[in-house]
Image (cartoon, rainbow, N blue to C red):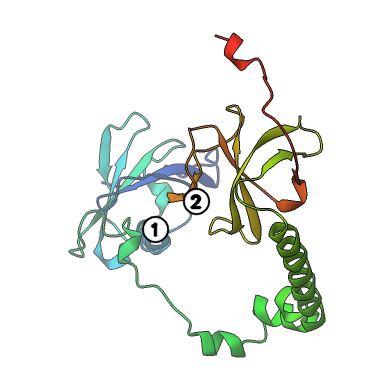
Amino acid sequence: MILSGALGAASPATVSISISSSLNSFRAQKRYGRGLTIAEFKCKLELVVGSPASCMDLELYTADDKFVMKLDSDEALLGSYPIDDGCRIHVIDRSGARVGEYEDVSRVEKYEMSATDYEKRPDSVRSFLKRSKVGKFNEEEMLKKEAEQEQKLAEEKALAEAISVGARCEVRVSGQPNKRGTVMFVGLAEFKPGYWIGIKYDEPLGKNDGSVNGKQYFECQPKYGAFVKPQYITVGDFPEEDYGLDDEM
């Protein structure tokens, strides 16, 4: 049934309604012109619910979800039906699609571009970086960084070779209290680049038990172990100090 004359002079040109569908669980809030035919309206709904316009049945519900009527005349105007702001139009799909089919994005075929094709694109981020000589595409800058890293590694190696396992030492890091301990490890490690000195502190002032990420570099009690860069290590006659930790409960 169509209520002719519903599009009166007092009626606004557009109406704000919610759209639901038998194919999915979400609702969309949209505004449409009352002058659209139902056929035109269905075409716009294709982008909202995913159903083909030719396979739609439309039902009108009030703002409090009470069924009003079917919108079953494709030639009729949307405004010829008793539609007000807040009403809901439910789309029933007759295409045979399964419920939730358009919600599962994992089933959507994804476009993948080969590395060769991407390399040829003039408008890609990679092309921009190449033209601008930024980051790894700046050969001069990359060579400079590599030289700096090699120099740093050589300096760390020289400092590390002067430190022997078993030596007493003091760790001196700016902004932190000096801590004494025994050298337990000297060399390269897997957790970070460069040379590292493994220390067993005299008191539980460390961060680990001599292991990092499941790899054991030396053994000590938990919280007694730490790894420090060689430039912060001073080797010498450093007897154990009493930090007074035994007096705390």
Measured along the vertical axis of the image, is residue 170 above or below residue 117?
above
Q: In this view, does 25 lie to the left or right of 187?
A: left
Label 1, secondary structure: give it: helix
Precedes in sequence: disc 1 or disc 2: 1
User: Would residue 68 appear left or right of 152 to someone viewing this image?
Assistant: left
Amino acid type for the residue under numbered disc 1: Leu
Q: What residue type is labelled 2?
A: Tyr
x, y percent for residue 185: 57, 51
Instruction: Please rate how many residues cluster around mark 2, counting C-alpha atoms within 10 Å: few if below 14, some from 14 to 19, many from 20.
Output: some
Taking depth in this image into account, of 206 and 91 the one nearest to the observer is 206
Pointer 2 residue = 217
> Which label number is shown at residue 45?
1
> From the viewer's perspective, is 161 left or right of 78?
right
Q: How far apart are marks 1 and 2 (CA)?
A: 64 Å
Is 60 located above or below residue 63 in the figure?
Answer: below
Q: Which of 213 and 79 is in front in this view?
A: 213
Q: Residues within 10 Å of mark 1 (few under 14, many from 20)?
A: some
Residue drawn at 70 percent across, 32 percent down? 179
Which mark lies nearer to you, 1 or 2? 2
Picture coordinates of residue 168 (x, y %)?
67, 40
Residue 50 seen by the camera = no
In percent of width and height, residue 240 lies at 67, 28
**Residue at image x 69%, y 24%?**
241
Residue 217, position in %: x, y? Answer: 50, 51
- Mark 2 lies on a secondary structure that is loop
Q: Identify the residue shown where x is 40% and y is 73%.
A: 110
Q: Nearer the viewer, residue 216 or 127?
A: 216
Is 220 located above or below residue 123 in the figure? above
Contact (Cβ within 8 Å) of mark 1 with mark 2? no
